[in-house]
Each structure stands twice: as C-alpha cells, then as structure tokens.
Image: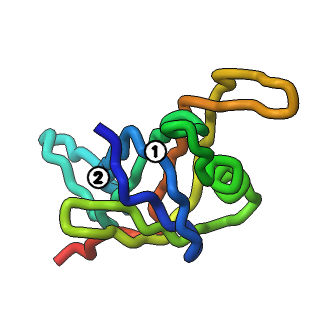
Amino acid sequence: MKFTQGIIVDGTYFDLPMVSLKRSADFLDKYAERTEDGVLHRELIGVYYNFTLTVGTSTAFGETTDYDAFWDKMTEPAEFHDFELPSGNGVYRFTGYISSVSDEYSKILVGDSQFKGFTCKMTAQAPARRPG
C-alpha cells in the first residue's frame, strides 16, 4: 500500500509515491546516572519524534513525479526544514534537519534516469512534548 497524501517541505508540496514513513520517539536526557545503590536518576529534556521516509520509484504509473525537485530540496545545504507529514490524525508538522539521504538507479536511459529506494532520515529540532 502506498500513501497518496504526499509531503510538504518548507511550504512546497511534493507528489511522491510514499512507500513507508517510519516514526520513532527518542527520549533525550540532560543527564542519566546510576548511583551506587543501582538506582537510575535522570532529567528528561524531552521526547523527539523522528522519521525515516522511503519513496518509491521516480516514475509512478507511467507518469513522472516530483522526485528530482524533492531530491534537490532534501539535499540542499540547509540547517533546518519545516516538514508536514501524513499522520493518523491528519498532518504532523515539525521543524527538523536531514541526517541522511540515499537512493539508487533503477534504470539508466539515454538522456534520462530512473531511481528507486529513496530514503531520508528527518530528525526533530525540538521536543514533541514538554515534560510535566
């Protein structure tokens, strides 16, 4: 099954064949330390929602997609981006950075190429929820 909602990055909508959108909730501590009695003491900074997006081939159902423009956007040397991703409740919005992007050629044609397996990791800049 493929998502049909696309993705918005920095206000630009990209019509892409999304194959997977993996979400993780990472807990970041200011400190975490075990005392001699074996008890863990920690101060939680926050919970960060991070995502790994996988996009299908650069041609979907015989039509071109926004793949090349999306590749350019996701690999531009920007410190942060504003993301809008499909979620169970509609749309999840956050500011974050790209920590990696990869894909591979599926076909190399004269004057054109097709790609598959685009994957990128998006890491949140700020916690999704504040403690307390």
Query: What coloring was used for the rendering?
Result: rainbow
Residue 22 location in percent, x, y?
34, 43
Identify the residue at the far front of this view.
Answer: 62
Query: Measured along the vertical axis of the image, is residue 114 above or below residue 107?
Result: below
Q: Secondary structure at mark 2?
A: strand
* Labelled disc at residue 17: 1
Residue 19 x %, y %: 39, 39
First in residue order: circle 1 vs circle 2: 1
- Name the residue nearer the viewer: 35 or 55: 55
Q: Nearer the viewer, residue 108 or 132?
A: 108
- Amino acid type for the residue under numbered disc 2: Ala
Q: Residue at x 60, y 38 (%)?
A: 58
Quadrant containing the N terminus is top left
Q: Name the residue at 62% across, 45% down.
A: 64
The residue shown at (57%, 60%) is 97
Residue name at image x 69 percent, y 56 percent: 69
Identify the secondary structure beneath mark 1.
loop
Q: Residues within 10 Å of mark 1 (few under 14, many from 20)?
A: many
User: Mark 1–mark 2 contact, CB under 8 Å?
Assistant: no
In the picture, residue 85 is in which quadrant?
bottom left
In the image, 36 versus 108, the foreground residue is 108
Quarter of the rendering containing residue 132: bottom left
| Label 1 vs label 2, nearer the camera | 1
Q: Is 63 situated left or right of 122 in this image?
A: right
How far is disc 1 from disc 2 in space, using C-alphas? 24 Å
| Side of 98 where 35 appears, left or right | left
- Return the x and y of residue 61 as percentages of the image width and height: 49, 38
Which three-letter amino acid code belongs to the residue tagged 1? Answer: Pro
How many other residues sit within 10 Å of disc 2, few (<14), some (14-19) or many (≥20)? some
The residue carrying mark 2 is 25
